Each structure stands twice: as C-alpha cells, then as structure tokens.
Image: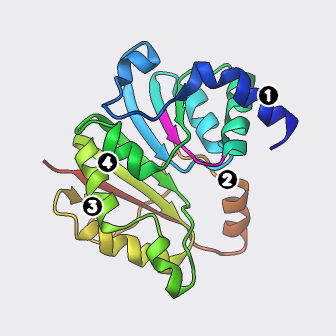
Amino acid sequence: MTPVQKRALEDNWPRWGLEYAEGSLDIDAAFGRPGHRVLEIGFGMGHSLVEMAEARPETNFIGIEVHRPGIGKLFHGLENTGADNVRVYCHDAVEILRDCIADASLDTVQIFFPDPWHKKKHHKRRLIQTDLVSQLSERLRPGGYVHLATDWEPYVEHMFDVLEAEPTLLNTHGPRVAVSRPDYRPLTKFEARGERLGHGVWDLMYHRQR
C-alpha cells in the first residue's frame, strides 16, 4: 500500500466504509438518500468504479473488495473527483451477500473481469458458481440484472453454463448471447490494449424474471 493509498483509506473509511455485520444494510440510510442501487464485487484498484460514480451521481454504488490498497486507491480517486456516491465493504463477498444485503434490494450487480483461474484444478476457485449466482439473483429486484464481463473465452462458456442454469434469470438477448460493452462500463487500458491485439471481451447481462 502506498502512503497516498494508506492516507486515503484511513481518512475516508469513516465516511465511505461499511462494516460487516449480521442484519440487512439500510442502503438509503448509508447514502443519506434513495437512488438506483448498484453492487460491484471485486472492483480492483477502483478506476472504473470512480469513473462510473462520477458519471452517474444519482446512482448509489456499493463496492466489495478485500484488497485494501485497491480501496485506498478508490478513495483517493473519489477525493479527486468529488464523488460521494460510493460505499465500500472490505470483506468476503459471499458473507456480505448472505448477511448484509436484503432480498430484492438491488437494481444491478456487476462483476467485471474476475480472476478466471485458468488451470482446470483451480476452476473450483472461480467466483462465478451456481450458489453465488443464485444468491445474486435473490438480491435483485424483479427486472434487475447481473452484468458480467471477462476477456477469457473458456470462462465465458463457464459463465454461460452457470447463468443459463439459474431459473430466475433470463438473457433477454437470447441464450448464450454476449452483448456489446454498454456505454456506462468504462473501457480499461488493459481492455483497450487487448482489443488492439485482437483479443475478445464478452459482456453478459441476465435479468431477474420473478
């Protein structure tokens, strides 16, 4: 953790940090207002989340990240932009979903470029699994959606398998169909470089039906 990240984390945790606790989070109270509710799992160093928060000030973003330098970087970015519409958990996402996020309380869940765990013996470590997707769907309001993105084609096929098997979710573009990157998802430097080299990127969007 750099000195800047450490300072930003310590100074802003009381303002933007959320503590893990059993019992559902009062999301409107956490932000001091109602608003469209987006949960992002694994925001890394926070570059995209800062950009989205600045571009959509009316939206309330909840981030989950266990990498403390990334949270410090995110907070530093929020300081620089003046955005105040992000709140963050530094805790395991599965436990946060289970204990802190109420059913039908979210409009969107987004997970961008999770670790694909390339080796077959490590596939069980992948974040996108049947139980997690079921949890995510339960936390969405009807009509809300899960948005995933990856640049690893074998992981895309795994994501499709898991999402298509969840009976409460529907890909409104068609079975196993990826969509073009929505304007609201920022293009990362890594992604732009990959596109120049001809690498694929897949965005998957599945809506809660009931």
User: Which residue has dot 2 on it?
Assistant: 188
- 58 relative to 95, above or below: above
Please name the residue shown 45% across and 64% down the image: 127
Residue 131 appears at what percent x and percent y?
Answer: 29, 63
Judged by depth in the image, the label closer to the viewer, 1 or 4, is 1
Please name the residue shown 68% across and 30% down the image: 75
Q: Quadrant of the N terminus?
A: top right
User: Which residue has dot 4 on it?
Assistant: 145
Looking at the image, tell me whether mark 3 or mark 4 is earlier in sequence order: 4
User: Which residue has dot 1 on it?
Assistant: 7
CB atoms of marks 2 and 4 within 8 Å: no
Q: Amino acid at mark 3?
A: Asn
Looking at the image, tell me whether mark 2 or mark 1 is earlier in sequence order: 1
Q: CA distance from mark 3 to mark 1?
A: 43 Å
Residue 39 appears at what percent x and percent y?
Answer: 43, 40
Q: Of 189 and 18, which appears nearest the observer?
A: 18
Q: Which residues are magenta?
A: 62-67
Q: Amino acid at mark 4?
A: Tyr
Q: Residues within 10 Å of mark 1 (few under 14, many from 20)?
A: some
- 150 relative to 102, above or below: below
Q: CA distance from mark 2 to mark 1?
A: 25 Å
| Secondary element at tag 1 | helix
Q: CA distance from mark 2 to mark 4?
A: 22 Å
Residue 191 appears at what percent x and percent y?
Answer: 66, 61
From this viewpoint, is residue 81 visible? Answer: no
Q: Residues within 10 Å of mark 3 (few under 14, many from 20)?
A: many
Q: Give the side of residue 148 with respect to residue 162, left or right.
A: right
Q: Amino acid at mark 2?
A: Thr
Residue 44 appears at what percent x and percent y?
Answer: 64, 50
Looking at the image, tell me whether mark 1 or mark 4 is earlier in sequence order: 1
CB atoms of marks 3 and 2 within 8 Å: no
CB atoms of marks 3 and 1 within 8 Å: no
